[in-house]
């Protein structure tokens, strides 16, 4: 047994240079965001966004260190859940500020960013570096079905509203019912999600790195990052509305693109890193779990919280363009991943569709 293996067995923590750089970036980001909060809308907004992204990367790094202990399936679910924490905080503060359209666009934008941008970048990077990569086909089919069911249930109140059915006059009640059903569906699907993702994955020609951080250190850093993310998210939202006016950006584009990408920094960072290492199944599990949890957990929790705590009321009645965009994204992603293979050209196609959708919301 080597000295490193013995240290890992004793549960000691070893920080690498990249870890120290990430810690410094988080500390500097939070400090600068605090110092500039309320002093120049655009600068405060940019620095708060950078701080959110740095904290998200720290959460991703900590959860990555838990991967060998909990297994790939549980790690994917845990990483997606913790990865959505910045989005949850940002959305709650935005609802408190009355920015309902921003939150609705951010919910759909987060799903689109993960399914099209992050997954597309993962396929592109992994495909260019390693050629065609394999996904667990059973896992891909299971996720495809769950995405259709969850996203379909999430947008059904929108269809009822725009088709002028009798339910259109009860959009808040229907949204609350849908929220409760989606949360129940998440609870029922969680064991299957973890079990189906817990499949061995070989990484040809690459030794698997042992965890460098002890369990208490990883959990402690997760807690610190979560608390810091709550404060930074508040500053981010406070600077968001003045920055939108200063830059002449619509609420729809701000939520769909800017807020969604800032809140999905974990998936951006971890998905690309895993794909570059040829860990395609783990990358797929991390990236694809996030939109699933947004539809099954984040959106329902925000609907219920907004009505219980007196924030601006959030319903699941989205604009027709948002509904069509998310349904097209789910359909395309399911078709591409159903065969259990991915390549760089499919990744480029997903990125291209995301760019067109984002551009269509630039004017509102």
Image: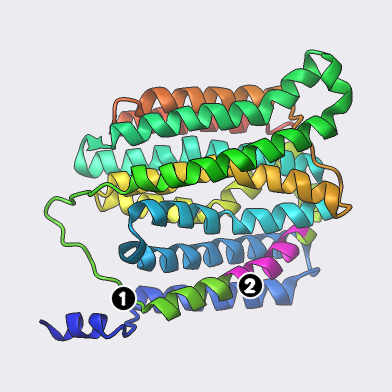
Residue 348 visible in the shown view: no
Please name the residue shown 56% across and 38% down the image.
Answer: 111
Viewer-nearest residue: 155 or 170: 170
> Element type at marker 2?
helix
Report which quarter residue 332 is drawn in.
Answer: top left
Q: Position of residue 53 (x, y in %)?
A: 55, 61
Report which quarter residue 19 is drawn in.
Answer: bottom left
Report whether 232 appears left or right of 166. left
Mark 1 crowd level (few <14, some 14–19, many ≥20, 10 Å Cα): many
Mark 2 crowd level (few <14, some 14–19, many ≥20, 10 Å Cα): some
Please name the residue shown 18% across and 50% down the image.
Answer: 202
Report whether 71 appears left or right of 241. left
Q: Main secondary structure of the magenta part?
A: helix
Viewer-nearest residue: 61 or 269: 61
Which quarter of the image is occupied by the N terminus?
bottom left
Q: Position of residue 245 (x, y in %)?
A: 81, 48
Q: Badges 2 and 1: C-beta atoms under 8 Å apart?
A: no
Q: Position of residue 272 (x, y in %)?
A: 37, 50
Please name the residue shown 43% across and 26% down the image.
Answer: 334
Report which quarter residue 21 is drawn in.
Answer: bottom left
Residue numbers of the magenta segment: 226-237
Viewer-nearest residue: 359 or 289: 289
Which quarter of the image is occupied by the C terminus?
top right
Q: Position of residue 20 (x, y in %)?
A: 41, 79
Residue 170 visible in the shown view: yes
Q: Which mark is residue 261?
A: none
Q: Which mark is residue 228?
A: 2
Can you identify the residue that label 1 sits on?
Answer: 212
Please name the residue shown 69% across and 62% down the image.
Answer: 233
Report whether 43 appears left or right of 262. right
């Amino acid at each position: 047994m080597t000295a490193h293996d013995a240290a890992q067995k004793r549960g000691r923590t070893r920080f690498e240079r990249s870890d120290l750089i990430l810690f410094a970036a988080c500390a500097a980001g939070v400090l600068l965001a605090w110092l500039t909060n309320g002093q120049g809308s655009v600068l405060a907004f940019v620095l708060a966004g950078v701080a959110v992204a740095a904290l998200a990367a720290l959460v991703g790094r900590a959860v990555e260190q838990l991967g060998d202990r909990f297994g790939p399936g549980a790690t994917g679910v845990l990483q997606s859940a913790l990865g959505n924490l910045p989005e949850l905080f940002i959305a709650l503060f935005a609802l408190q500020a009355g920015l309902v359209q921003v939150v609705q666009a951010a919910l759909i934008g987060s799903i689109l960013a993960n399914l099209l941008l992050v997954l597309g970048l993962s396929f592109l990077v992994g495909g260019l570096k390693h050629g065609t990569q394999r996904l667990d086909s059973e896992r891909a089919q299971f996720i495809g079905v769950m995405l259709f069911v969850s996203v379909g249930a999430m947008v059904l109140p929108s269809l009822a509203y725009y088709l002028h059915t009798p339910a259109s006059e009860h959009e808040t009640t229907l949204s609350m019912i849908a929220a409760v059903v989606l949360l129940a569906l998440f609870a029922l699907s969680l064991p299957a999600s973890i079990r189906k993702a817990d499949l061995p994955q070989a990484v040809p020609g690459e030794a698997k790195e042992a965890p460098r951080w002890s369990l208490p250190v990883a959990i402690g850093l997760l807690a610190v990052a979560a608390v810091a993310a709550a404060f930074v998210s508040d500053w981010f939202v406070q600077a968001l509305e003045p920055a939108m006016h200063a830059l002449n950006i619509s609420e729809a584009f701000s939520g769909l693109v800017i807020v969604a990408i800032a809140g999905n920094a974990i998936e951006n960072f971890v998905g690309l890193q895993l794909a570059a290492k040829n860990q395609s199944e783990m990358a797929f599990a991390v990236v694809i779990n996030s939109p699933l949890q947004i539809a099954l957990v984040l959106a329902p929790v925000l609907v219920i919280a907004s009505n219980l705590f007196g924030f601006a009321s959030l319903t699941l009645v989205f604009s027709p363009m948002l509904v069509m965009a998310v349904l097209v994204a789910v359909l395309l992603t399911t078709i591409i991943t159903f065969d259990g293979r991915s390549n760089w050209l499919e990744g480029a196609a997903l990125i291209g569709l995301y760019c067109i959708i984002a551009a269509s919301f630039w004017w509102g």
